[in-house]
Image (cartoon, rainbow, N blue to C red):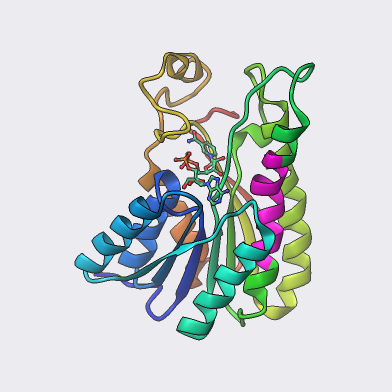
Amino acid sequence: MSTPLNGKIAFINGGSRGIGAATARRLARDGATVAIGYAASAAAAEALAADIAAAGGTALAIRADAADAAALKGAIDTVADRFGRIDILVNNAGVLHLGDVAQFSLQDFDRTVAINVRSVFVAAQAALAHMGEGGRIVNVSSTNALRMPFAGGAVYAMSKSALTGLAKGMARDLGPRGITVNNVQPGPIDTDMNPADAEFGAVMHGLMALPRHGHPDEVAAMIAYLASPEAAFVTGADLLIDGGFAA
Ligand code: NAD
């Protein structure tokens, strides 16, 4: 079995389910020690860590509310204290609040920004204190950074677009340290956030070159590539994995 991430320490912000959980499994399968950050879903995160351990990997579930900057930093520091450093940071935590812009609440706006954008910055700052040459930061953005064909998604689209500028600027700052920063931009992926069997699924399929939802494992594979030593020359990039949704 190929283990390109052997010896690496990974922190996944929002790792208990969906794309985050698939990424935890995949990075662990590739040899990394994986810390699974969660906000409310302790049971799911603990069960995932136990599954990974049963499969021969090393994983730790750790409470890390992405909306709480001090708590998120504290969790990353704890993981670094325990394992010695952080090599890979995956910023996956995200929320989708839909609502017409005329009525959208400031509370939902602020929460979206706190979780989808600010936590990426906070987690990166915290991880960088423990990250050396070869470090990897991968953010889970969205194809909605490029295309927002449905109503009510203005604030979500803004939050994912913000990651494009953030990753480009961070890539510049961190290149001299041998650290890369990239975004993956998934299209419709079959998770709690966007179940394939929802009525809206068919609408999205009508907009795609490959008319289906993606599987979380397909996104995890792209994240694993960006986290690997093979991706050393990729930085500041947005990588679409969207079945042609934005094409
Ligand atoms: P999901 O709802 O299953 O996962 C969201 C994850 O974020 C969960 O693990 C959740 O616990 C976590 N999270 C939410 N608030 C948090 C907080 N305050 N602190 C810590 N964790 C928190 O859906 P998903 O599809 O797996 O979403 C993962 C990422 O993928 C999100 O950033 C989402 O915006 C992005 N995305 C999803 C799709 C899709 O179609 N499913 C498409 C593009 C991008």
Which residue sits at x=50%, y=86%?
84
Q: Where does the image place residue 184, in percent across and percent down from the top left?
A: 56, 48
Q: Where does the image place residue 158, in percent across and percent down from the top left?
A: 74, 36
Q: Is residue 55 above or below residue 82?
A: above
Q: How many marks?
A: 0
* Quarter of the picture holding the N terminus: bottom left
Which residue sits at x=34%, y=53%?
43
Q: Nearer the viewer, residue 90 or 104?
A: 104
Q: Can residue 135 be spotted in the picture?
A: no
Locate residue 151 relative to residue 8 in the image: left or right: right
Residue 50, quarter of picture: bottom left
Residue 122, quarter of picture: bottom right
Q: Which residues are magenta?
A: 111-124
Q: Nearer the viewer, residue 3 or 87?
A: 87
Q: Where does the image place residue 142, in percent across and percent down from the top left?
A: 59, 39
Which residue sits at x=55%, y=65%?
89
Q: Is residue 109 above or below residue 65?
A: above
Q: Is residue 178 above or below residue 148?
A: below
Locate residue 141 relative to residue 175 in the image: left or right: left
Q: Can residue 56 be spotted in the picture?
A: yes
Q: Nearer the viewer, residue 178 or 9?
A: 9
Q: Where does the image place residue 52, in percent across and percent down from the top left?
A: 28, 63
Q: Is residue 171 above or below residue 14?
A: below
- Find out whether residue 117 is within the magenta segment: yes
- Find out whether residue 137 is within the magenta segment: no
Residue 235, quarter of picture: bottom right
* Quarter of the picture holding the C terminus: top right
Which residue sits at x=42%, y=13%?
199
Secondary structure mostly seen in magenta is helix
